[in-house]
Amino acid sequence: MLLAGIAACYTVLRLADSPQWARRSCFSKGARLFTDNLSEADSLVIERGALRMALQRKGGRWLVTQPLATGADTATVLRFIDCLERAPRLDQLPLHDLRRRGLLHSDFGFTQPSARVVVRGALSRHEIIFGGQTPSGDGVYAVLANAGDMIIVTDLKVIESLPGSIEEWRDKSLLGDCEGKWTALEIRRPNAPFMKLVYENNVWRLIQPIVARASTKRVSELLELFQGARIEGFITPSGTADDSIAKADLMGYGFYELDADNAIQLQFWESGSPAGLRVRLGRTVEGNIGLVYALTPGDNSLVTVTNALAAAVPSGVGDIRSKRVFDGTTTAVRKVSMQYDNETITLLRSEGISGEEWQITAPVALAADGHNTRRFISSVMSLRTEMFIELDEEHYEVEPLCRIELELEGGEVQRAKLLQSPAMPTWYEFSHNGSATALAVSVSNMPPILINRSGVLELADRTVMSVAAQSLQRITVKGEERDELVERKAGTVGDQWVTATGSADVEVLQEWATALSELRATDVVQLGSKAQDLAAYGLDKPWLEVTVDVDSERTVRQTLLVGRKSAESGRYAAVRGHDVIYELAPEIVAMLQRPLTVQ
C-alpha cells in the first residue's frame, strides 16, 4: 500500500509538471470557477472537517440556522461569497485525461474532501467540493457538481477563507443588526429600583419609578455603548456542542434564576419593532476582571463582554436623571414667558431680514436687545441642579417668585415654578408641572433677571428714536422759554432749512439729525408706564418736547418728551404713545439744549 501511494504521488507530480498541463494552464488563464453571479445567493451550506454550518439570508442580513440559530457576521459572509465568485480557474483536467493516465479522484484528495460548499439562489444551485492542495502549495483541487468529473485547480485563498469554527462567522455585535432608533429602555439591577424610560419629543423621560426628565446625553451614551458592544467570546455550558442553555448551568455565571432580578438586565425597544431586545449581564469572568458574562437577546447564547457595559448601567434614578433645569438649546427657544404676580413679561423670537430678532411683546411691544436677550436665554438653558429635593407641604405653601414657560421649535412647551427654598435661603428651587421633586440651584448660578423682574429692563432695546436724516422734514421744539420750528426748504437738495424767525443753525441741525437717526438711552427705566409714572418722572409736564415730522403733511411724526433730571445728571424721556421710560445721558441732554436757530 505504501508503494501504491508513492506511485500515485509520483503520477500527480508528473502530471502537474508535464508540457500538456502547462499548455492547458495558458489556455484557461483568466477564467473563473463560476460564470454566474453569486451575489444573489440566499442560502449557504459549508462542510469543513467536523463543522457543518447552514446560513440563510434574511433581507440584508445573514443568519446561522445550523447547528444553532444565531446571527452571522454579514460582512464576513459577503466577503467569502465575493471571494468564491472571483475564484480563478487556474487549470482543469477532463475525465478522459484522468482515465488515460490511470488517475482516480482519490489521487487528488477527494476520498476525504477538505471542504464542501453549496450556494443556492432563487433559480440556481452551485456545489463545489475541495480536495487536496496542488504540489506547488498555492492551489487546491476542486470539483463542481455541474461539471461532471472534471478536476479544477483554483486559488488556495478560497478554502482558506472558509471558517474553521462557527465562532469565526458569528455576529459578534451584542445587540445584533439594529438601526438604533430607540423608543424605550428598561433597566433592572439588584438592590435598585426598576427604571423605565421613553423617548418623546426628542428627549428621554423617566416614567418609572418616578416621572421626571432623564439626561438625554447620559441615555444616548448608554445606548451607543451597548449598540457598539462586541462579544469577546462564546461559552458552551456543560460542554455541549451548541449554545443551548439550561437554567442550572447559569448559576455559575451570576444569573441564578432567569425570572429573578438578580443580574443586571436591560430591555431595548426599537422603532417599528414591538419585541424588545433583552440583555443580561452576570458576574466577572474568572481570571479576567475586564470581562463579564452576558446573555444575548432572547437568552440564546452565553457570551463574555467588556465589564465597561456593567459599569455604565445606572445604579439608580439619580444616576440617569437630567440635572438640567430646562432641556434644549438656546437656538431652539422661540418664546419665553415670565409671570410675576399679576405682570407677565414675554419675549418672542422671529426671523427678520438681518436674521434672528427678539421682541418684547408684554407688558409692552418693544424691540429687545439681541445680545442681552441671547445671553439671558443661554444662562437659563444652562442651569443645572446641584441637588434634588422632594416636595412637601411646606413647599406647596410658598408663593412662587416667578412662573416660567419656554416654547421650543417643534411646539414643545416646558413650564416650571421658581421659588426661594424654604429651608435654604441662599438657594432657589425649580419645580416642573407634575413632578414631586424640585431642582435646587445656588443663588450664585441664578440669572438675576429671573429673581428680580426689574432685571428684564436689561433686555429692552435702548433705542429711543430712529429717524433717517434724509427723511427729516420738520423739527419742532417746545420748552421753558423755548419755541422753535425748522423745516426743510421745499424743492431743494441737501441740508437747506428755513425757520419762522431768524435763520437755521446748520451745524446744530446736522448734530441733531445724526443723534435722531439712532437716539439711544443709557438705561430703560420702566416698561408699561401709567399716568402716575409719567408724573413721577416729570413727563406729564415735560422740560422739553421735541416733535419730528418725516413728511410734509405732518401725518407721520414722533414726539420725544424729556422730563426731570436723573441721579446721573441725565434726564428721563419717553416717546408719546409708547409706554416705555428711558434715561438719557448728560451729553444727549446738552445737545438738546442747543438752539436750532440763530437770531
Image: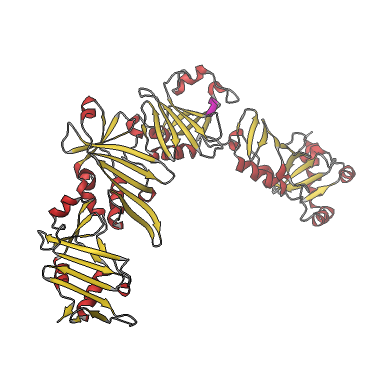
Q: Quadrant of residue 206?
A: top left
Q: Is residue 327 magenta?
A: no
Q: Is residue 6 visible?
A: no
Q: How is the image coloured?
A: secondary structure
Q: Quadrant of residue 163?
A: top right
Q: Residue at x 21, y 67 (%)?
A: 546
**Is 91 positioned to the left or the right of 167 in the image?**
right
Q: Nearer the viewer, residue 104 or 361?
A: 361
Quarter placement of the N terminus:
top right
Q: Is residue 107 visible?
A: yes
**Is 41 positioned to the left or the right of 322 in the image?**
right
The correct choice, above or below, for 511 with respect to 215 in the image is below
Residue 138, position in %: x, y?
Answer: 69, 49
Residue 402, position in %: x, y?
Answer: 25, 40
Q: Which residues are magenta?
A: 295-299
Q: Nearer the viewer, residue 201 or 294?
A: 201
Q: Quadrant of residue 538?
A: bottom left
**Is 548 positioned to the left or the right of 598 in the image?**
right
Quarter placement of the C terminus:
bottom left
**Is 28 positioned to the left or the right of 280 in the image?**
right
Q: Is residue 297 magenta?
A: yes
Residue 124, position in %: x, y?
Answer: 78, 40
Q: Residue at x 34, y 37 (%)?
A: 322
Residue 461, position in %: x, y?
Answer: 27, 58
